[in-house]
Amino acid sequence: MEFLDWLVIDSKPEKDFFLEVYSRQILNNKNHKEVAEMCVSFLHQNTVKDQIMFKAIEKIADLEEKVTDLEIKKERLEKRSCSLIEKFSTYLSK
């Protein structure tokens, strides 16, 4: 998976249709108090989702950092191991 592939959203026609229906219901609603209450509710939901997304991305970054650190440590151990084997082989061949 490429770096930004996970950001691509596959939109389904059914979901797009319902989104459009709900959007038009809100736009055509003559009860301004009801629309204002919906907006406040959506604002709160959006804020919570933003916070959850931020924490999820932060956690992913932490995990990726740990993976990178482990890969570096593994490479160092493999190099050290190869070096020790070469030294031991050299010692035995004498």
Image: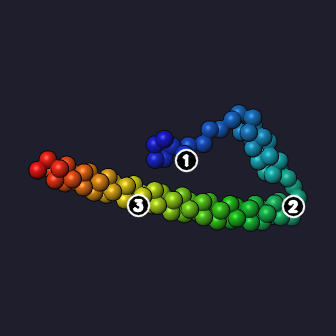
Name the N-terminal-most of marks 3 and 2: 2
Q: Position of residue 94 (x, y in %)?
A: 11, 50
Between circles 3 and 2, the one closer to the viewer is 3
Quarter of the figure with residue 69: bottom left
- Characterize the local packing of mark 2: few (<14), some (14-19) or many (20 or more) Cα atoms within 10 angstroms: few
Q: Position of residue 17 (x, y in %)?
A: 75, 37
Q: Mark 3 sits on what residue?
A: 69
Name the N-terminal-most of marks 3 and 1: 1
Q: Please determine whether, in this image, residue 51 is positioned above or below residue 67.
A: below
SS category of the residue bearing label 3: helix
Q: Residue at x 46, y 43 (%)?
A: 2
**Viewer-closest of 2 and 48:** 2
Quarter of the figure with residue 18: top right
**Circle 1/circle 2 CB separation < 8 Å:** no
Give the spatial CA distance, label 3 vs label 2.
Answer: 53 Å
Give the spatial CA distance, label 3 vs label 1.
Answer: 25 Å
**Viewer-closest of 30 and 85:** 85
Q: Mark 1 sits on what residue?
A: 7
SS category of the residue bearing label 2: helix
Residue located farthest toward the left when viewing the structure as drawn: 94
Three-letter amino acid code of the residue under disc 2: Glu
Give the spatial CA distance, label 1 vs label 2.
Answer: 33 Å
Q: Position of residue 4 (x, y in %)?
A: 48, 47
What mark, if any, has residue 34 been given in the picture? 2
Q: Is residue 61 in view from this perspective?
A: no
Three-letter amino acid code of the residue under disc 3: Asp
- Characterize the local packing of mark 1: few (<14), some (14-19) or many (20 or more) Cα atoms within 10 angstroms: few
Quarter of the figure with residue 77: bottom left
Name the N-terminal-most of marks 1 and 2: 1
Three-letter amino acid code of the residue under disc 1: Leu
Q: Residue at x 80, y 46 (%)?
A: 22
Q: Residue at x 14, y 47 (%)?
A: 93
